[in-house]
Amino acid sequence: MTTYIITYEVNDNSRKTKLKEKLKEFKSYCPIHDNCWAIRSEDKPAEIRDALNTVLNTEDRIFVIRTGTHAAWRNTYSDKNSNWLKEWL
């Protein structure tokens, strides 16, 4: 399994809610902030993008990138999120 960072710009709240529900379908996920999540998947970035694209329209933006070896953050949503990031990034 690989950890990916997903960032997005979705201006419609209904589509943003659908996107977040779609992100929760991955086996392991962690919201980083309102427009950025981390997920774990065996899929390739283009496959993840295409799966998420099913709830987006042509005005929405999405970016999928495999994580590297170093990361830093401040003020996660909870200790649970911080622990997830420590384990999988």
Image: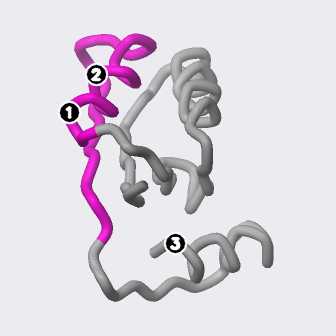
Q: Front-most of 31 and 1?
A: 1
**Up/down of 37 relative to 8, above or below:** below
The quadrant holding residue 85 is bottom right
Return the residue at label 3: 88
Q: Amino acid at mark 1?
A: Ala
Tell me which residue sits at (31%, 67%) in the image: 67
Q: CA distance from mark 3 to mark 2?
A: 23 Å
The quadrant holding residue 59 is top left
Residue 57 position, x and y percent, is 32, 11
Give the label, 3 or 2, closer to the camera.
Answer: 3
Q: What number is the disc on residue 46? A: 1
31 horizontally vs 15: left or right = right
Tell me which residue sits at (59%, 23%) in the image: 13
Return the residue at label 2: 50
The local secondary structure at tag 1 comes to: helix
Give the position of the C terminus as an image quadrant.
bottom left
Q: Disc 1, disc 2: CB below 8 Å?
A: yes
Q: Earlier in the sequence, mark 1 or mark 3?
A: 1
Q: Amino acid at mark 3?
A: Trp
Is residue 74 inside the magenta stretch?
Answer: no
Q: Earlier in the sequence, mark 3 or mark 2?
A: 2
Residue 84 position, x and y percent, is 65, 71
